[in-house]
Amino acid sequence: MYFYTTFLFLSIAFFYYARISIDSNIDGYAHFALYICAMQKIIAYPLTVLHFILFFLMLVIFHPIQLICHKIWGGYDAHRKSVAILNWFLMQTQLPLFNTFDFKFKEELPVGPSYIFVSNHQSMFDIPPLIYHLRHYHAKFIAKKELAKGIPSISLNLRIGENCAIDRKDARQSIAALIKFAKNVYEKKRSVVIFAEGSRSRTGVPKPFKTKGLLTLFKYIPDAVVVPVTVNNSWKVDRYGKFPYGIGNKISVLVHEPIPIVGRNGEEVIAQAESVVHGAVTSTAIDS
């Protein structure tokens, strides 16, 4: 059944190509490029539906698993491992779209210190590889409060996994929540992942870092080590909008060398991290 559906969409793409070839005066190379783009998007529709089914299935399955791990079997450590496994499976749900992940460290980071992983942000698919590959550092996330309700597994983890949900429209609540979160990170030697640009760049073009949240973290986690992280190509998954997803992309995550903050000016550390993160962005919609 899946084969016949794919064949049908390929046939539609072929006829679309034939139509633009007849109805336009574009040269052969442009014809071919338009055909490839049309074919990719048409094929992406059934593949995205399959991805949605698998993605939602994982969220539903792991919701009760998280609860059991958290409340009955092992508490914090068991829950943390269940979240890591969930996010491994969420990465695999990209395979029907022929999207893959590549995660690299420029140098090995010893387990123990509190790290502040400072990353650019391109799509929600930045998050599963970060959760999975940074699991040994007990990385906690700062997210908008809307994600803390109504989404199986994801909302649950935000609430019970020592993460931080902030109201971006309420500065007072955001700072209070961030301070409470930072104190817990410092006390328990956790780490933090923060998308310092504040929101997604749907074109991959880097945005300036917002400093207030980072400076608050520096103040309440004074012995932390900043680690710049660059995400590339995940914006291509959202290149058509929410549906369908882009196909055939290699989403890469590069963890750079650490930057200690002890004895450093916070603004200078942020500027250095921003330069490192943005300097490693290799692909944007502007360049494509």
Image (cartoon, grey):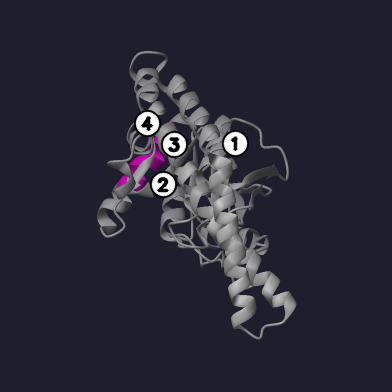
**Secondary structure of the residue carrying numbered label 1:** helix
Q: Residue furthest top?
A: 73
Between disc 2 and disc 4, whose residue precedes? 4
Pick the front one: 39 or 245:
39
* Of labels 2 and 1, the one closer to you: 1
Viewer-nearest residue: 10 or 117: 10
Q: Is residue 156 above or below residue 200?
A: above
Which residue was labeled with disc 1? 133
Q: Which mark's residue is nearer the viewer, 4 or 3? A: 4
Q: Amino acid at mark 1?
A: His
| Circle 3 residue | 185
Q: Nearer the viewer, mark 2 or mark 4?
A: 4
What's the mark number on residue 142? 2
Q: CA distance from mark 4 to mark 3?
A: 29 Å
Please state which amino acid type lies under the numbered disc 2.
Ile
Provide the major secondary structure of the magenta segment: helix
Indicate which disc, 2 or 1, sits on the residue closer to the N terminus.
1
Q: How much space separates mark 2 and mark 3, taking CA atoms?
A: 12 Å
Pointer 1 local density, CA inside 10 Å: few below 14, some 14–19, many at least 20: some
The C terminus is located in which quarter?
Answer: bottom right
The answer to whether residue 282 is above or below residue 82 is below
Residue matched to label 4: 60
| Three-letter amino acid code at the position of disc 3 | Val
